[in-house]
Amino acid sequence: MTARATEPTKKKKWAPWSDPEAEPFIRLVDVSKRFGDFLAVDNISLDIYRSEFFALLGPSGCGKTTLLRMLAGFEKPTSGRIEIDGVDMADVPPYERPVNMMFQSYALFPHMTVEQNIAFGLRQDRVPRDEIARRVREMLDLVQLGPLAKRKPHQLSGGQRQRVALARSLVKRPKMLLLDEPLGALDKKLREKTQFELVNIQEETGITFVIVTHDQEEAMTVSCRIAVMNQGRVVQAATPTEVYEFPNSRYVAEFIGDVNIFEGRVTESGADHAVIGAPEADCRFRIDHGISANVEATVWLALRPEKMVIGKTPPEDPTVNCISGVVWDIGYLGNLSIFHVRLDSGKTVTSIRTNRSRETELDITWEDRVYLTWAPGAVAVLMT
């Protein structure tokens, strides 16, 4: 299946969540779920909009799958309210909700062909035979499995079985599709390819997708917005760019991608700048915007590895936005080189450099003293 060159929905200027007049398609209000004494979901309020590709992201046990199952109707909230398309779901059983769910295992019927698997739900609903045939053909075209319609699941690759399960979930035309770790069983390259295929299919159908994943890159690739979860709570819900570049806490900064965290104390705080001293970095961080912290306040500084420029020549002022140390380890990934640098304080930081030219040896090697510098706008200042 070949991904098209068109941009996915999430890259278009489309942000109903920032419009106070927009009506959410899914609304969770103060939703909690207990299993005995264990609080799996803790007072979550969340709005998801029509045609959005929304990701629930977090580690195992954070409550994301429980939240998905409550949307599907397989679990009932202990307290709170769930609305879908303006209708309170409290007394609506799973089979009457405008929702379909795609499971990680795919759960295909091994004795049925591809087209029979896709048609199964329509047959159960007693849809007319001609209508079933037409809609199955539409789905086969959508997931590009027409030539494989007569094959059975054991004759398909993992990616093809994934697309059969997706077609079967979409053929009944639900208003919302729930995806529980749908790509977890695929190898890395196939998973990356299928992520873009999912985006294209979601964009073409216009169906609201809600995906559960623990894979940060997957959530960043497919979603319009991400809800980062921890211990049953949503700690930040924002676009992938906002979550990565402007995390609201150390937890989010550390969970999404790689990051270097420094503890600091504010020494200057103005309307358009701030200066923060970080003893473990032996450096003053100069920020090119105001921050919501007073002088002497303790803050944390989040600096992504790719934001730092690594070199062996010190800048004019090595005490501002510059740290120095010795290269302790190097990881060569072909397109990137990862440098682990041990500072004089003993702290180890990570810097990433794109390998722009073809070289058999790096110009920076083990035990070299290096200088890491960054722009004033590269640092996120965190209060918690």
Image (cartoon, rainbow, N blue to C red):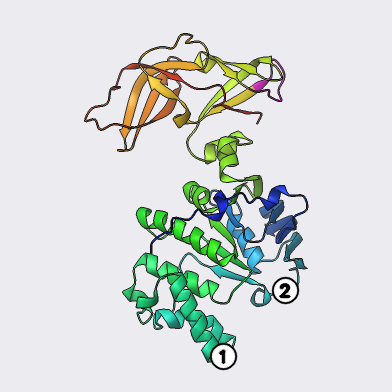
Within the image, what quadrant is residue 90 found in? bottom right
- Image quadrant in which the N terminus is located: bottom left
The residue type indicated by label 2 comes to Val
Between the residue at mark 2 and the residue at mark 1, the CA separation in whole angstroms equals: 26 Å
Q: Secondary structure at mark 2?
A: loop
In this view, 122 is above or below 141: below
Under mark 1, the amino acid is: Pro
- Count residues near mark 2 (Cα–Cα under 10 Å), then give few for <14, some for 14-19, many for 20+: few
Against 254, is 11 above or below?
below
**Residue 122, percent across and down?**
55, 83
| Relative horizontal placement of residue 356, taking residue 112 as reference (left or right) | left
In the rendered image, the quadrant that contains the C terminus is top right
Verify whether residue 177 appears in magenta. Answer: no
Of residues 360 and 261, the one drawn nearer to the viewer in this rendering: 360
| Residue 380 visible | yes
Determine whether the residue tagged by mark 1 lies in a helix, strand or loop. Answer: loop
> Which secondary structure class fits the magenta region best?
loop
The residue at the far left in this view is: 360
Using residue 340 as the reference point, say whether residue 27 is left or right of it: right
Residue 128's label in the rendered image is: 1
Q: Which residue is mark 2?
A: 92
Q: Are marks 2 and 1 in contact (CB under 8 Å)?
A: no
Please rate how many residues cluster around mark 1, counting C-alpha atoms within 10 Å: few if below 14, some from 14 to 19, many from 20.
few
Q: Is residue 295 magenta?
A: yes
Res. 181 visible in picture: no
Residue range in magenta is 289-298
